[in-house]
Image (spheres, rainbow, N blue to C red):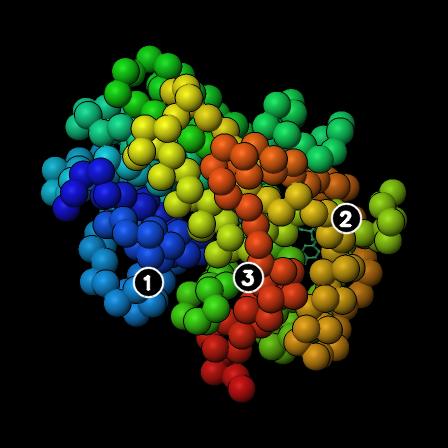
Amino acid sequence: MDKKKGVLVSGGGGYIGTHTAVELINAGYEVVIIDNFSNSDESGVKGVREITGKDVPFELVDTCDKEALRKVFEKYEFDTVIHFAAYKAVGESMDQPLKYYQNNLVSFMNIVEMMKEFGRNNVLFSSSATVYGEPETLPVTEESPRQPATSPYGNTKQMAEDILRDCCRAYDSLYGIALRYFNPIGAHPSAMIGELPRGVPNNLVPFITQTAAGIRECLSVFGTDYDTPDGSCLRDFIDIVDLAKAHVAAVDRMTQDKMEGKYEIFNIGTGRPVSVLELITTFEEVNNLKLPYKIVGRRPGDVKAVWADTSKANRVLGWEASRPLGETLKAAWKWEKNIRDME
Ligand code: WQD
């Protein structure tokens, strides 16, 4: 394995990890996936192998297990790690804060410690627009202030960003990029990988596709009394394949030694606000179906509106989102039908 082309993808069995592994391989990188399957299963890794035709190495590893992680670093030559492995359910984190702080922070600190111990150079961290909370001004730039986290999940994202920043400053060989995702949605056009939420989906699009599939009776729209054009919340829904390609652009930047500093942050979104009701209407139109939904009260913790200023990623990474929302929602529905063996 060529160290410069080698990329370890922790949590690579998950939704964003699998899509990113595919795009990395398409770009010529040699990927190793590790995952503990706490929120995914082997089907994602199989999908990556089928799509790329590569027998991608996989290790069943919990990144909180430092000795198991050390064995991965001893076995494989890679200079870059993309760290996805984390719990990500906002609501669950409110009920189980310690589970989130231990898992999300210990796993990340183990990764950074191993990078230092083995003299590996590049860490790409999966952060989130949730760090912006309820922004005062929109769109948010990377300089927009982070708001005090409203959930332990969001707090682990902010704390991990600071851990990465401080370690890059302290350790000569370490470089880091944090990608702040907005709302990832959709699936690979092949419908061989996609989002596989366990239990009742928290997020909007998987709830929509499961409702369309008849698995859920009716979608609840959490509030249309916001001060927005149609009363429903505004979000920046970013296609999962566009998001995956942003990771390739960030890895290119690090492996080609183009970093201007030791630690950089990028917003990864479309820059286009879309409302919940607009997304529902678009889903119905492009998939030619009627979605049963009802308007209910607001969901505690929801922000009214958040979307990205993506000019820094456009300019510095040479990346921008390109897939139209309709195509993304077609792919989401195709994926749902595929996993439910529906026509
Ligand atoms: C989007 C909009 C809901 C479900 C969260 C995390 C973020 C990232 C993405 C992990 C909101 C509305 C939703 C439903 C609805 N997660 N909605 N009915 O809350 O913007 O972001 O997920 O990295 O970090 O904070 O995403 O999809 O849950 O909600 O009306 O059944 O859809 O009120 O306005 P969110 P979401």
Q: How far from the left and from the top, in percent, is residue 26?
A: 33, 57
Q: Residue 36: tell me if it is visible.
A: no
Is the shortest distance between ligand 1 and the CB of mark 1 under 8 Å? no
Q: How far from the left and from the top, in percent, is residue 18?
A: 38, 56
Residue found at x 23% / y 63%: 54
Instruction: Tell me the kind of residue under disc 3.
Output: Gly
Which SS class for mark 2? Answer: loop
Q: Which residue is mark 1?
A: 48
Residue found at x 36% / y 39%: 252
Q: How far from the left and from the top, in percent, is residue 173?
A: 26, 20
Residue found at x 45% / y 50%: 244
Mark 1 neighbour class, 10 Å CA radius: few under 14, some 14 to 19, many 20 or more: many
Seen in the picture, residue 98 relative to 295 is either above or below; the reply is above
Of the residues under marks 2 and 3, which one precedes in the sequence? 3
Q: Nearer the viewer, mark 1 or mark 2?
A: 1
Q: Are marks 3 and 1 in contact (CB under 8 Å)?
A: no
Q: Which residue is mark 2?
A: 233
Left or right of 106: which side holds 271? right
Mark 2 neighbour class, 10 Å CA radius: few under 14, some 14 to 19, many 20 or more: many
Instruction: Tell me the kind of residue under disc 2.
Output: Cys
Is the shortest distance between ligand 1 and the CB of mark 3 under 8 Å? no
Of the residues under marks 3 and 1, which one precedes in the sequence? 1
Which SS class for mark 3? Answer: loop
Q: Nearer the viewer, residue 290 or 154?
A: 290
Seen in the picture, residue 278 relative to 95 is either above or below; the reply is below
Q: CA distance from mark 3 to mark 1?
A: 16 Å
Instruction: Tell me the kind of residue under disc 1.
Output: Val
Left or right of 309: which side holds 179? left
Q: CA distance from mark 2 to mark 3?
A: 19 Å
Q: Which residue is mark 3?
A: 186
